[in-house]
Amino acid sequence: MFREIAITDIPGLRVGHAQDAEAGTGCTVLICEAGAVAGVDVRGGAPATRETDLLNPVNLVERIHAVVLSGGSAFGLDAASGVMACLEERGVGFNVQVARVPIVCGASLFDLPVGDPRVRPDRAMGYAACQNAVAEPPAQGSVGAGTGASVGKLCGMERAMKGGFGHYGLECGALRVASAVAVNCLGDVLDPDTGSVLAGLLDEGRQTVLDTELEMCRRYADTGNLFAGNTTIGVVVTNGRLSKPQAAKAASMAHDGFARAMRPAHSMWDGDTIFVLATGEVEVDVNVVGILGAQTMARAIANAVMYAEPAYGLPAARDLPKTA
């Protein structure tokens, strides 16, 4: 009934990465030059986002042209200005009579603890990602917005593991739904099919992955600030036809994928955010987009850590087969 697809098998979608591997940061852009109906659902307590208010169904703009996922914390939101410049040169944007304004939404994750915190995705990096965008399956792992991502940070970076960027898609008849995500969570990443832990909080010997939720419960009286290094940001793309309210609902349902593949999800120290882009080629029940959005998002999260490579002193999932 289902066939696996790449996210760029959604017609009209192009994806591009740009990164500074030495500095440990980067950005990823998903572009629909013809425009896509969009929605967003921000669940985490520490988000860094751009142009999310215009996605409110009561507001004017119906379609957007790109979503930028970036590192660099709130500094990294500047990458979207480079994407805007690149798209403006191509004549892409919302027609305001005197100009065309590219509508570019975005979200950033906190990767400053790795590499060089003085280097963040900026206008130039966003422009490069836009120029790099193609309709071919994008690389996964330690690339783009996942370059400096990490997971399992309850006990500090010395016991964390490498996060990354992943994508995964499914086709059901004429309907296509795919997800892309940069995984940089406080907690652990699980295989959504088996429930086994793929990456997360390491024990003191850095040989075994522990259970972050269990460790947090043991420390229930610890109210310290754990914000330094979290947030998972993603995009669900479909060729289905959705309204703005339906796109927002689909984004809400797709957060189930976060809960299936990350423990915990949506904490006060995560800025978990999901966008939805709908290109409008196939009539579809919004519930089905939400169901497949959650399924593909969970698998994209797993791919992000399984394709990641060790870097910045952080081991990768492929290096640690044992779990506690």
Image (spheres, grey):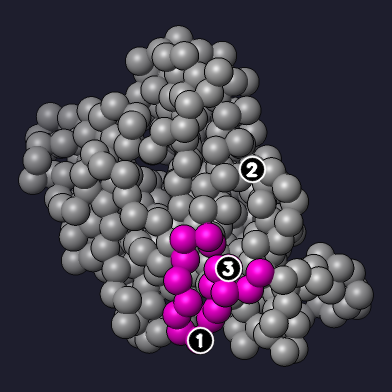
- Closer to the camera: disc 2 or disc 3? 3
Instruction: Determine crowd level at label 2: few under 14, some 14-19, many 20+ residues with C-alpha closer than 10 A.
Output: many
| Residue 147 place in picture, x, y as percent | 40, 69
In the rendered view of the protein, which quadrant contains the C terminus?
bottom right
**Which sits earlier in the primary sequence, circle 2 or circle 3?**
2
The residue lying at 32 percent from left, 82 percent from top is 22
| Residue 206 place in picture, x, y as percent | 68, 85
Residue, far front: 321
The residue lying at 9 percent from left, 40 percent from top is 90
Assess whether residue 70 is covered by the magenta stretch.
no
User: Mark 2 belongs to which amino acid?
Assistant: Gly
- Closer to the camera: disc 1 or disc 2? 1
Magenta residues span 305-321
Instruction: Determine crowd level at label 1: few under 14, some 14-19, many 20+ residues with C-alpha closer than 10 A.
Output: some
Q: Are marks 1 and 2 in contact (CB under 8 Å)?
A: no
Majority secondary structure in the magenta region: loop
Assess whether residue 307 is covered by the magenta stretch.
yes
The residue lying at 85 percent from left, 79 percent from top is 222
| Residue 56 place in picture, x, y as percent | 50, 34
User: Mark 3 belongs to which amino acid?
Assistant: Ala
Q: Nearer the viewer, residue 147 or 316?
A: 316
Q: Relative to 278, say whether 46 is above or below.
A: below
Identify the residue position indicated by label 1 in the image.
Answer: 313
Q: Nearer the viewer, residue 230 or 319?
A: 319
Identify the residue position indicated by label 2 in the image.
Answer: 257
User: Mark 1 belongs to which amino acid?
Assistant: Gly
Tell me the distance, in whole angstroms, between the alpha carbons under discs 1 and 2: 28 Å
Identify the residue position indicated by label 3 in the image.
Answer: 317
